[in-house]
Amino acid sequence: MSQARLMDGNALARRIIEETGERAAGLTERTGTAPCLATVLVGEDPASVTYVRMKQNRCRKAGITSRHVALPAATTTGELVATVEELSADPGVHGILLQHPVGDHIDERAAFEAIAPGKDVDGVTFASFATRSFGLPGFVSCTPGGIMRLLDAYGVDPAGKRAVVVGRSAILGKPVGMLLLARDATVTYCHSRTRDLSAAVREADIVVAAAGRPRLVRGQDVKPGAVVIDAGYNAGNVGDVDFDSAVERASLITPVPGGVGPMTIATLLEQTVEAAARQLGVTVV
């Protein structure tokens, strides 16, 4: 069997960001207001600082205004919630991104829930999860949303297929399973406590690895011809899938890096422009 075809998230993300920039420019021209994404960062975790800077750079390329709020590591839950609520009430802010993690001493869920649903462009609130799970208009969690865009771009229709999601986080594993279910896939959730994970993976037509454990999914367990989405990122540019062995059996596979990661940011920017359009009462094509 020939090697799997790589799913190029970089190329697709560039196209989405370019299209998003065109829509942002059209929105700004029609309303006189540029879409604005507020980013909130607690502390100075190096990885988080890098991620936020990357998102700000992408905002500029897409014609989106970026407002950054940097808070000290000692910020309390109450102080963070108050900051997020202030941004939620600010008509000049159309989308809010709270960079996580925020510190063990902070109630992260309380901070997420302070984001107004209409500005939850990162798709982290209860409201966003519920609306998308019920097939109603709302914002998706950005990584799951990006995964679905990748599947569509490569002609993968989940309908009738067995999808195994390895991971159950609130902003990745759980929502991507719901998005696949909404597209008529038969979804199985697995995780670190799953007995005989290999057996579950062997049945999958679509595998989404999102457990945060390097090389957890072994190539020998990948069903020949399966589509493998590696949403993990571990030290040393290693994903949650053993790429070298999985690429020999899958039909399509995402590389790490360059697969799912770029799609996350592209989805965030796309949803920011959509949020701005809704708040400004216009339709942007």
Image (cartoon, rainbow, N blue to C red):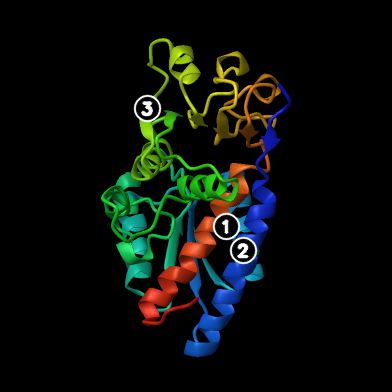
Residue 235: x and y in percent read: 65, 30
Q: Measured along the vertical axis of the image, is residue 80 above or below residue 48? A: below
**Quick one: label 1 or label 2, which is nearer the N terminus?**
2
Question: Mark 3 belongs to which amino acid?
Answer: Tyr
User: Which residue is the site of mark 2?
Assistant: 17
Image quarter of residue 196: top left
| Mark 1 or 3: the one toward you | 3
Find residue 266 and name its label: 1
Q: Measured along the vertical axis of the image, is residue 125 above or below residue 19? A: above
Q: Measured along the vertical axis of the image, is residue 269 above or below residue 248? A: below
Determine the residue located farthest toward the right in the rendered image. 2
User: Which residue is the site of mark 3?
Assistant: 189
Question: Mark 2 belongs to which amino acid?
Answer: Ile
Q: Are marks 1 and 2 in contact (CB under 8 Å)?
A: yes
Question: Mark 1 belongs to which amino acid?
Answer: Ala
Within 10 Å of disc 2 (Cα), the crowding (few <14, some 14-19, many 20+) is: many
At 46% from the left edge and 43% from the top edge, which residue is drawn? 101
Residue 38: x and y in percent read: 48, 66
Image quarter of residue 63: bottom right
Q: CA distance from mark 1 to mark 2?
A: 6 Å
